[in-house]
Amino acid sequence: MEWTKQHDKALLGEMTISDLFQYKKGTPERGQLWDSIAGNLNAMDYPKFKVAKRSCRDRWTLLRTKYKRRMSKEREATGIDAEVGELDEIIEDLIKKDAAIDSVKEGKKKAEADKKAAEEIRIKAMERFGNTSKRSREDGEEGAKKKKRRSGSDAVEFLREKAKLEHSLREEELQLRKDQQSQTLLISQQQQQMNQALLTLMEKMLPKERD
């Protein structure tokens, strides 16, 4: 099938009203949505489509690549943002949606890394305390009496530091959860706004196509 501007417009319209970019690339959910998009296009009377999800996905990749390359060249040549047409605006909004899911993914990775680092700190603290207790047991009887008094102090100090560490970790974990929830809410609101704007744009464009 030969792709025309009308075909591209229909493809981008189906992508806009789908939840395609709420799922990461390569997930089964995203693959199912590409199947749905291809099915909706093949059911259209005009323009005529004969596509599979692979061809739809490849066409989107090509449109996105051409758009980014053209914007970059025009910006370098003029020093200002290039003018965009109807399809360019839709492509740009879809690119932003795709980038938003990547931002959420990076936020989750950072939270997991922070949690892992905190756990390593906890383990090292326990190891230091274990080594201190072992040295105390290996000392002589007279030294053991002195160590006994010190070990009580060490234990109190350890418990105090352990409590501080756990409190700090809990506060950090709560803050990470709040940040992640705020980011997810913001992305959801932005996607709803973009969907509404694009639907309005498509409604304005459809009468022109009928003419």
Image (spheres, rainbow, N blue to C red):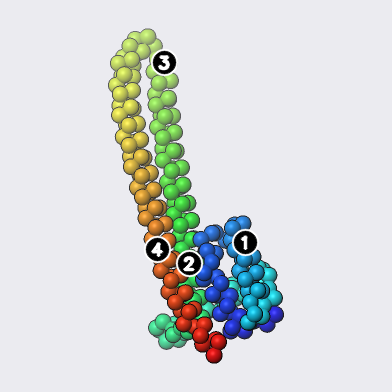
Q: Are marks 1 and 4 in contact (CB under 8 Å)?
A: no
Q: Nearer the viewer, residue 49 or 155?
A: 49
Which amino acid type is shown beneath numbered disc 4? Answer: Gln
Residue at 43% of width from left, 43% of height from top? 115
* Residue for badge 3: 137
Q: Is residue 166 left or right of residue 16?
A: left
User: Which is nearer the N-term, disc 2 or disc 4?
Assistant: 2
> Disc 1 versus disc 3: distance between alpha carbons?
62 Å
Q: Where residue 185 sits: x, y (%)?
A: 39, 58
Labels 4, 3: front one: 4
Residue at 40% of width from left, 63% of height from top? 189
* Residue for badge 1: 31
Examine the image and state in which quarter residue 56 appears: bottom right
Task: Give the secondary structure at mark 2.
Answer: helix
Is residue 71 in view? no
> Disc 4 versus disc 3: distance between alpha carbons?
61 Å
* Residue for badge 2: 97
User: Which is nearer the N-term, disc 2 or disc 1?
Assistant: 1
User: Which is nearer the N-term, disc 1 or disc 3?
Assistant: 1
174 relative to 52, above or below: above
Q: Nearer the viewer, residue 146 or 97?
A: 97
Task: Specify the label residue 106 is tagged with.
Answer: none
* Residue for badge 4: 189
In which quadrant is the N terminus drawn? bottom right
